[in-house]
Amino acid sequence: VITANISSSFDFHPGGTDKGRHSIEIGILYEQREQRRFALNPRGLWTIADFIDNTQIIGVDTNIVIGQDTVQTGVGPQLVDVYQTLTQLDDDDALFYRAIRKGENLHDFVNVDEFTPSELSLGMFSPIELTSQDILKFYGYDYTGAKIGSGVTFDDFFTSTKKTDYGTTIRDFPVAPFRPNYTAAYIQDKFTYKDIIVKLGVRVDRYDANTKVLKDPISLYDIKDANQFFKEHGDQFRPLNIGDDYKVYVNGPDDNTVKAFRDGAQWYFEDGTAANGGNVVFGSGPRYVQYTNEKAGGSWIKERGYDPNDGFEDYKPQINVMPRLALSFPISDVANFFAHYDVLVQRPPGNNIATALDYFYFGDQGRTPESNPNLKPEKTIDYELGFQQKLTNSSALKVSAYYKEMRDMIQIRDFLYLPSDLNVGQYISFDNLDFGTVKGFTFQYDLRRTKNVTLLVAYTLQFADGTGSSSESSRNLGSRGNLRTLFPLSFDERHRFNVAMDYRYGGGKRYNGPVLFGKNIFANAGANLQIIAVSGRPYTARKLPSQFGGEGTVGALNGARLPWNFTLNLRVDKDIRLYTPQDNTKSSLDLNVYVRVQNLLDRRNLLGVYGATGSATDDGYLTSSRGQDVLGGFQGAGLGDQYLASYTWAMLNPSYFTLPRRIYVGAILDF
């Protein structure tokens, strides 16, 4: 990571006085990341070596006898002819069978199991021999594990070649490292206007994934749009609402009759009427298109003449402007009003690296990339307003209301109804789909040190709803389409109570605690108690139990709630002065010893349950009809008790419970 950060702050005094002072902060940030990866399945490597060590031998040539051999038959030993093997040597990408033969005739069989690992290397293979079997993933390195330069580009993967020791030319598959860059600039001004304290600022972010991405996530190749299609086929009817950039689908591979149109993810019938989805247009039938490049289609991406510009384009840098405003002003001698508005943008946190190598095998079963390099930053817009009221000289009440809007949140998505010639009808990837809101009220009572006590009591009422709780929450739901229904988010806590109480004795003349044998035994000692009570988070109830889970849905998604959680944490500590310097310019030596107890009552608060039962210890499977059938099979084999005990242990998922009581004893030396 290369980072450059320049920041400055200064005060501006109009008229040379403090009356209208502006406190200015400015800054510029640049960050260049470079990510590399090399992952190899060694067992799969040996399997492939065993599979292709004699790949050039395709049979025997009965016209060429190279010798005779003795074999045992029912009538005794007999001489049989040994024929020359028949070979096929026209595959330039087949290197291993050549490299493993150290001068041997290419007609001879070789057993790779006779070699030791030290006699073999990745360079004996061609890149396609390793990557075609999905045992090797890499970027920022070549296929042998050697680091490549930062100047390698996405296009180089498809165009770069090298000469082999055998006079052939092969593609060497250099995969560029992932090199996103991020730039930001900000300015903030803090000033006072009459009685109003104002913080006003703006931040501008620029994020560039610095790679190539699919032009259209629903096709590997560029589909003819309406503008090009109707120029070539003027006899076809074009509805008035169909834009020039809408993709055109036809009735067959050699049929120019329009079947449907598509604008992004919105489908239209041939007459221009909007369709609720591709399922109502095609059903289970094929999808035919015409590509802008006549060579496109099927596995053209694997051909040597493939042009990566047909289907891919540069990532469009994302520029986001984030204004920020905070106000605070008195509404009386004992009350203060405050408010703020804030926009926060976050770069894609993950699932955004897909390389040219990943797309090369796009049409192979199970190898379409889940990661999406075309992800945009996530955005959060935050509003809050409230007031703070003085109750006494040592206590105050604070009330606030907040609203947070989350946009372009990353969620897994099913991309459906790809052209049929791609051999992949649909695939799963990530996209900026999710939307959510968090809104609520906070009430807080603050008691500053009064005699020996400090107290903070807070209550929050919150409603968190959205289309997805995490980037994976829609997995296994995509077959129903990409649902955009709002439901309670998994981190929604409707009620939360927080109490923090500190009881502490001072030292010297400030000590007001018990005295034992003339000693202030609790001087500079105290205890801090934290009480947390939270209403249960939502989960989805299941209709039928399964092994360690459930199937079907009862009610709405996240329509059930866990029970309340209640936690007490305690910290008891004492300060001890070890050394007091005579010289005020020197520091004293102090020791703080403490005992900290988390989950003081050792409560087994629930963080999760099995959806079919609502229990954290029983998934309901063993008492279901399916579970009884499985259990009966083990009982018939005399293993019923062992299976029952093992399954019961496996159901005790530690992630479903808070941690047990933990006690820490420690000391902090301050000098």
Image: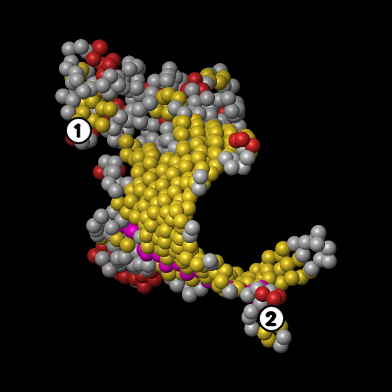
Task: Kindly state the secondary structure of the residue where label 2 is placed.
Answer: strand
Percent position (x, y) of residue 418?
A: 29, 31
Decide: few, some or many residues near mark 2? Use Cα within 10 Å; few <14, some 14-19, many ≥20: some
Query: Disc 2 vs disc 1: Cβ atoms closer than 8 Å?
Result: no
Which residue is located at x 27 percent, y 46 percent? 485
- The boundaries of the magenta stretch are 522-540
Q: Main secondary structure of the magenta part?
A: strand
397 and 405: which one is in front?
397
If the image is split into quadrants, where does the N terminus sit? top right
Q: Amino acid at mark 1?
A: Ala
Q: How many marks?
A: 2
* Residue 657 appears in the figure: no
Residue bearing the label numbered 1: 275
Does the stretch in magenta take in 526? yes
2 vs 1, front mark:
2
Percent position (x, y) of residue 373?
A: 44, 34
Q: Is residue 292 above or below residue 645?
A: above
Looking at the rendering, which quadrant does residue 247 occupy?
A: top left
Q: Is residue 610 above or below residue 233?
A: below
Residue bearing the label numbered 2: 520
495 and 81: which one is in front?
495
First in sequence: mark 2 vs mark 1: 1
Which residue is located at x 45 percent, y 41 percent? 343
Decide: few, some or many residues near mark 1? Use Cα within 10 Å; few <14, some 14-19, many ≥20: some
597 and 172: which one is in front?
597
Percent position (x, y) of residue 184?
A: 54, 34
Task: Kindly state the secondary structure of the residue where label 1 is placed.
Answer: strand
| In this picture, residue 590 sits left or right of residue 56 | right
Marks 2 and 1, how far apart in space?
Answer: 82 Å
